[in-house]
Amino acid sequence: MLTSAILARSLSVEHFGQIGIASAVLQFVTPCIVFNALGLVAINKVKLEKKSFQEFSNNYFTVAGILTIVSFTAGQILGGIYPAYGEVAYIIPILSFVMAFNEFQNAELIQESKSLYYGLYIFITRFVTILFVVTAVYALNYPWYAYFYALLVGELVSLIVRYKYHFNILRNFRISFDKKEFYEILKYGLPLFFLLIAGWSLNSIDRFIVLKYFSLKEVAYYTLAYQLGMSINLANTALTNSVVPIIYNAIHNNENSLRLINKYIAIYSSVIVAVILVASISFTYLIPIVFGKSYHESIRISIFIAIAFGFVGVYRIPVLVIDFYKKNSLKTTLTIIAAVLNLVFSLYFIRDFGVMAPAYGTLLSYFLLALACYYYAYKELR
C-alpha cells in the first residue's frame, strides 16, 4: 500500500495505469517460468525423501531456466510491437526467474511450518522494493517502469539472504535433465496452463476490458483497487497457508479432513469479514488523502475487489483437496467456467454500471468458484 501511495503521488494517473497493465503481464509470466508447477513443490515436500526432493528441485530449476530464455525472447518481440512497454519487456522475464526461486522456498517454509522466516523474507522483499521506489521514482523522478526495477532489486536481495541462511536446496542445485522428473513436471503443469490462463483472466481481464471501453485513467483506478485488495490477499495467504500442511497431512493420514476444512472455513470467514469491514471503511477516508483526490473513483471499486478477494480466501481452503489428489482437470474446468462468467458478467454489466461492471463481475465469479470448489471437496471427502 505504501508503494502504491508513492507511485500514485509521483506519477500521472495514466502512467499508474501503465503499471497496472504491465503488472498484469507479470502475473501471467511468473507462473509460466516454472511451467505452472509450483503446487507440486508443496506436495513433493510432504511425499518425498530429502534426496528425492533435491533431485526434483534440480529439474524444477532447470525447467525455470529454459522457460526464462523462451520468455525473454518473446519479450523482445512484444517489446518491439508495443514500444510503450518495451522497457518492462526486458525486465519481466528476469524478474519472474528470480521470483520463481523465492516462491519455491516460500512453499518449503510453509510446509516446514517456518512462518517466522517466511514473513521475514517477505518483509525484506517489500522493504527493499519500497526503498528503491522512494529513491528512484519519488526522489529522482525516474519513469514509471522504474517500479519493476525496484521489484527486481527487492527479489534479488531477498534471494541472496535466503541463499546465505536457509536455502539449502538452491545451494545444492545442479543442472539436471532427468526424463522422469521432467515428465512429472510436464504432466502436472501442462493441464494447468489452461488453469493459468483462466486464473489470470479472473484477476486481470478487468483492466484490459476497462482499457478497451474506457482509458488508462480508469485502468489506474482498477490498478489501485487491486493493490489495496492485496492487503486482503495478504490476510488470505497468512490465514490459509498456515493450514496447508495440516490439511494435507490430515488427508494423507485418512483423518476427518472434511470436518477440518469446515472448521477452517468458518474461522477464516469470521476473520476476513472483520478485515473487509475495516478495510472498506478505511478506503472511504484514506484513498483521497493518501493517494490523492484523482483516485476518488477507486473507492467503490476497491471495496468490491476487497470482497472478491475475501471469496478467494474461502476458495483456497477446499481447493487444497483438489490439489492434493492432483485433479488438475477439475480445477482447470471450474476456473475456466469462472473466468468465462467473469468476462460475460463484466461485458454485460457495462451498459448499466459503467466502469463498476468488471468489479461486479469479478466478485460474482469468485463467489461461484468458491462455492463450486467446496461442493467438489465435499464429494471427494465424504
Image (spheres, rainbow, N blue to C red):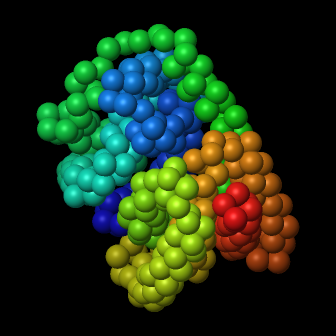
Residue reaching furthest left? 164
Quadrant holding the C terminus: bottom right
- Position of 27 relative to 366 (above/below): above
The quarter of the picture where residue 230 lies is: bottom left
Looking at the picture, tell me which residue is in the foreground, 41 or 17: 41
Say whether residue 258 is visible.
yes
Residue 117 left/right relative to 361: left
Q: Which residue is at a point 61% across and 32% down the rendered structure image? A: 189
Q: Which residue is at a point 35% across and 51% down the rendered structure image? A: 110
Q: Which residue is at a point 52% across and 50% down the rendered structure image? A: 252
* Count of number-bearing discs: 0
Quadrant holding the N terminus: bottom left
Residue 219 left/right relative to 337: left
Say whether residue 38 is visible.
no
Q: Which residue is at a point 39% across and 20% down the rendered structure image? A: 55
- Position of 55 relative to 284 (above/below): above
Q: Where is residue 173 in the image (x, y as percent from the top left)?
A: 30, 20
Residue 372 left/right relative to 314: right
Residue reaching furthest front? 254
Q: Position of residue 50 (x, y in %)?
A: 32, 30
Residue 53 left/right relative to 75: left
- Position of 248 relative to 262 (above/below): above
The quarter of the picture where residue 53 lies is: top left
- Position of 135 relative to 269 (above/below): above
Q: Position of residue 29 (x, y in %)?
A: 53, 36
